[in-house]
Image (tube, helix red, strand yellow):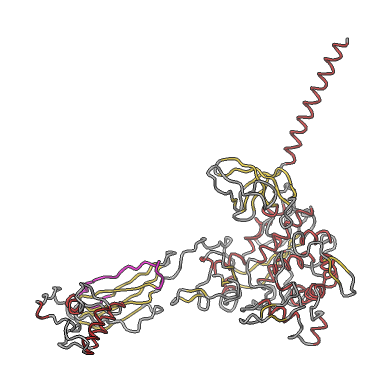
Amino acid sequence: MTRNFCRKLISIVLCVSFIIGIFCLFSASAAESSGTINSDKVNIRTGAGTDFSVLKDSGGNNIQLSTGHNVTVLQTVKAENDKTYVSWYKIKFTYNKAEYTGYAYSQYVTITPDEHDYTMPDGVPEEYKPYIENILKYYPKWKFVFYDTGLEWSSLFGSNQQGYPGRSLIPESSPISYRSTESGCYDWRKDSWVMQDAGGWYQANTQTIAYYMDPRNFLNINDVFMFESLSYDKTTQTLDGVEKILEGSFMDGVKIKNTDNKSITYAQAYIEAAEKTKVSPYHLASRTIQEVSKGGSDSVKGQGAVVDDKGTIKYKGYYNFYNIGASQGDHPIANGLKYASGETSSAANKEKYMLPWDSQYKAIVGGAIWIGNGYINSIYKQNTMYFQKFNTSGGNASHQYMGNILAPYYEAKTIRNLYNELGILNKSFTFIIPYYKNMPKTACKLPSSSNANPNNWLKALYFIDNSTDKDYISGFDGATLNWDVGTLKSNSFTVKATPVNSHAKVSGVGKITLKEGKNTVKVVVTAENGDKRTYSITVNVTESPPVTEPPTPTSPDIVIGDVDMNGKIEIADALYIFKHKSGEKTLSANAQKAADTNKNGNVDIGDALFIFKYKSGEISKF
């Protein structure tokens, strides 16, 4: 009986073990989540934290994943030694047909939520319906308000709107193909970009602006928060949430004094600012990090800023947490601190905005009042991050908070990831989506990413009569495409051209024979990026003599030093040599023989110097 009992006990233990194993297996599976990478060039590391090395593939190369790459999230891990990047996901993924396991910073991974039943709201513009449907099946409690701007889509990009130089900026790190080449943005003659703001900011071109202005590109569960209403909502915007935003920044857990000389945390200061202004504290906190970075710029250190090229420092003891008044120029931080000092404000504005901002608290709260009055609660109704950049709610393109067209995109990611960490994404949020008249049928796309040079201009163009060496194009300027050289008797010419950019290719040059009557010679410049520009030379040939090479004179007919062959050796002959070397003029074969005064077989500057020496009497013959 004892043996039977033992057998039964062992059977029970094995069954229980099996059941527990199965339970654990299913529990592990249930804990896994599907997700996608939401940024480009995301490093996958061997452990949770930036102090771990980047994971290598089978070829020994760093693994970097890009937007849209599918992953499986195995678990959430906190980094022990990384205060800036705290929350990490352990992920499993396929890369170059091989499976890997590594760690990604949680903000770069979007976990795919479960689908739900939903009801489409009324009034959704037809072109937005598929995007709204896709969002609502994951978050049915989210609310959407559609704002009719009344603006024609095509009117948004002109020189008086977002196309105005300095109004829509991209960082230097963006592909060159995103930059504008319009007047004031690019100098074709010098092949140089015009920096619109200190630190390497350039005007975006129309296609890039259109991509970032088209709401359809951001109507997804990751980016839609650029349209979130920025009004204060106590039910979703909490002190704990603000602390999450400030985590890893110079404000993390740090205390400051309020106007009552009471010590409070930065997070509490943002909550108090929200209560006074009815502006979202999440927006205020993330706006600070967007403007001054997690480490904090000179705008928030109270140490002043450089105000001129001599390195002079002014405005010590002042703070500007939102870079208000930090206008474009060589010293934007100094401009912002100048505003913070109250130096440029009226007595009424000083009182209204708590100026001067001689404490962190006054800068946070006073700046929030300024943002609320000037944008979110103003007549311009700029109550989303999108509207603060592209003021299509108020119709005044110049009334924008920032020039950086990427700012709403990155701020939206910060807020969305915060809500994800707080576990509140399934709550009710309100999004205000603009729409426009006659939008394109499909969402606008970014230009192809390329750093190839776009310059397809010429800096020099020559049209030389082969019988006289005369150039018939004078005063050439690359902006002019059509050149009429008039009526000529010769029919044999040489076309020469020099592009502004050395990477550009030129076709249509060389020796040409023209027919009698009107002729058009086309010179095509192809830029490094493939853009073409055509220059046309029109010439009317009145006679068409047979093309024959002139007889080569015998040596006695060529006088060494008489380059222009007028029977005299003059300073002008030396100048002919200089023009030949600079490319301004091409000497005939006979003229080149006469120009070889130092008899080294080449035409060079030394030949011109020999002519000068001959004319000065320093030498008597060549």
Find the magenta span and give its range. Answer: 500-519
Most foreground residue, 64 or 188: 64
The quadrant holding residue 210 is bottom right
Query: Could you say where residue 56 lies in the image, as x and y percent from the top left?
Result: 58, 46
Residue at 63% x, 61% y is 216
Most foreground residue, 101 or 622: 622
Q: Is residue 516 visible?
A: no
Please check the rendered image and state whether residue 317 is part of the magenta-colored stretch, yes or no: no
Q: Is residue 343 visible?
A: yes
Q: Looking at the rendering, in which quadrant would you find the C terminus? A: bottom left
Query: Could you say where residue 431 lies in the image, as x and y percent from the top left?
Result: 73, 63
Residue at 48% x, 74% y is 192
The quadrant holding residue 21 is top right
Q: Is residue 209 left or right of residue 347?
A: left
Q: Looking at the rendering, in which quadrant would you find the N terminus? A: top right
Residue at 77% x, 33% y is 24
Please check the rendered image and state whether residue 506 is part of the magenta-colored stretch, yes or no: yes
Query: Could you say where residue 390 lies in the image, as x and y percent from the top left?
Result: 65, 71
Looking at the image, residue 539 lies above or below residue 503: below
Looking at the image, residue 209 lies above or below residue 19: below
Looking at the image, residue 283 lies above or below residue 25: below
Q: Is residue 148 left or right of residue 519?
A: right
Query: In this view, which residue lies farthest toward the top?
Result: 1
Query: Could you say where residue 412 lies in the image, as x and y percent from the top left?
Result: 70, 62
Q: Is residue 236 left or right of residue 110?
A: right
Q: Is residue 284 left or right of residue 399?
A: right
